[in-house]
């Protein structure tokens, strides 16, 4: 028993419909054209590639075929074969949520977490609005980052990490998922989301495509912008990314209105414990100076990472 494919009528043979493919052993092709059109002009060019027969109509892409029809009749066996072929043909366009392990070095510790592309949340830098930020937050919540939060909490507990060190780990984690150089707003929103879900109080403000990220902090911090909301101080964490040079009188930033869960952590800039750096992280440097007419020479070990920290 044969099954007929849907009939396709061509008023012009468009390059987008230039090819039809089927097994030459099981398919029959019938081209029905007006009687006043010479059949020779409609004769298709045949190209054989393994077991596939390609009918190339591109030669006639500028040919007007009024009342011309193409019929393809296939057997049930061939239909099943075609479905299998189409399944494999569509494989490159299918995505499975397969976890991959992301690892990086963080001040001497190897950090790793599971992540898959289905968890990635994109953000259009040209559409920075309260609504788009809310959409990012909702999508990130649905994506589920249990492996990331497990890693963050484990590091905090095992290393007795202060808030500042914990935030550096959040920054490095966000960089692995959404590189800062690729999309700064998305990178900032990932940092913000991880800090929110880690229990910290946060604020966002925006102006002309720029996004400032604030954290609730009760300490006296100098030369960094801050905001006050509900009697609590919020200190900006990414002011330096904009050159630490924003005239807020001329360029007022509007607070982002978004629903967030209640927070239970207040951020502190105090550092009570440094990370456990590896010995290989240190380099030798000679220190020379003169004091009271005496020359002093010392060889000391320094760690460049401490400066960035």
Image (tube, rainbow, N blue to C red):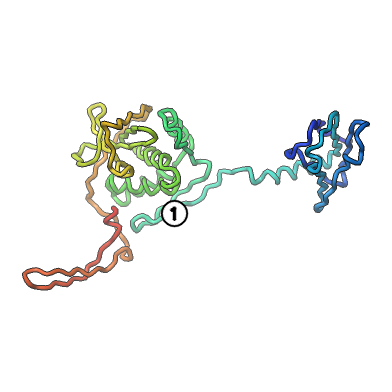
258 horizontally vs 80: left or right: left
Picture coordinates of residue 147 (x, y %)? 44, 45
Which residue sits at x=26%, y=69%?
Answer: 284
Whether 95 is drawn above or below 104: the answer is above
Label 1 Cα neighbours within 10 Å, binned few <14 / some 14-19 / many ≥20: few
Q: Quadrant of the N terminus?
A: top right
Give 83 or 248, whichever is nearer the viewer: 248
Which residue occupies the extreme right position in the image?
35
Q: Is residue 222 left or right of residue 62?
A: left
In the structure shown, which secondary structural element does the residue marked by tag 1 occupy? strand
Q: Nearer the viewer, residue 141 or 183?
A: 183
**Could you tell me residue 194's position as x and y percent?**
38, 40
- Residue drawn at x 78%, y 37% is 62
Q: Residue furthest left?
A: 292
Residue 293 locus on image (x, y percent): 7, 72
The residue beneath circle 1 is: 103
- Total count of labels: 1
In the depicted structure, whether residue 262 falls above or below residue 274:
above
- Vertical placement of 302 versus 38: above or below? below
Instruction: Please tell me which residue lies in front, 254 or 270.
Output: 254
Query: Residue drawn 27% across and 36% down?
Result: 247
Can residue 6 be seen at all in this image of the molecule? Answer: no
Could you tell me if residue 249 is visible in this image?
A: yes
Front residue of this view, candidates 89 and 56: 56
Quarter residue 146 falls in: top left
């Amino acid at each position: 028993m044969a099954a007929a494919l849907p009939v396709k009528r061509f008023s012009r043979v468009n390059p987008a419909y230039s090819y039809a493919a089927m097994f030459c052993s099981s398919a029959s092709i019938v081209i029905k054209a007006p009687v006043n059109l010479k059949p020779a002009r409609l004769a298709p060019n045949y190209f054989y590639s393994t077991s596939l027969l390609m009918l190339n109509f591109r030669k006639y892409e500028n040919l007007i075929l009024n009342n011309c029809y193409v019929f393809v009749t296939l057997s049930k066996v061939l239909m099943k074969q075609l479905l299998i072929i189409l399944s494999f043909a569509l494989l490159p366009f299918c995505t499975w949520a397969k976890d991959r392990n992301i690892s990086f070095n963080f001040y001497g510790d190897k950090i790793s977490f599971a992540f898959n592309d289905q968890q990635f949340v994109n953000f259009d830098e040209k559409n920075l609005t309260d609504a788009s930020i809310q959409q990012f937050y909702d999508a990130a919540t649905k994506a589920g980052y249990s492996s990331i939060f497990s890693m963050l909490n484990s590091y905090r507990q095992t290393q007795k990490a202060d808030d500042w060190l914990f935030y550096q780990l959040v920054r490095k984690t966000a960089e692995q998922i959404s590189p800062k150089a690729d999309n700064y707003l998305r990178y900032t929103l990932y940092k913000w989301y991880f800090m929110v879900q880690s229990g910290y109080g946060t604020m966002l403000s925006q102006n002309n495509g720029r996004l400032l990220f604030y954290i609730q902090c009760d300490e006296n911090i100098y030369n960094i912008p801050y905001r006050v909301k509900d009697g609590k101080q919020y200190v900006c964490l990414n002011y330096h990314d904009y050159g630490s040079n924003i005239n807020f009188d001329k360029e007022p930033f509007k607070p982002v209105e978004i629903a967030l869960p209640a927070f239970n952590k207040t951020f502190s800039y105090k550092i009570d414990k440094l990370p456990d750096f590896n010995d290989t992280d240190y380099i030798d440097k000679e220190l020379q100076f003169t004091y009271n007419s005496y020359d002093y020479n010392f060889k000391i070990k320094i760690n460049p990472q401490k400066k960035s920290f």
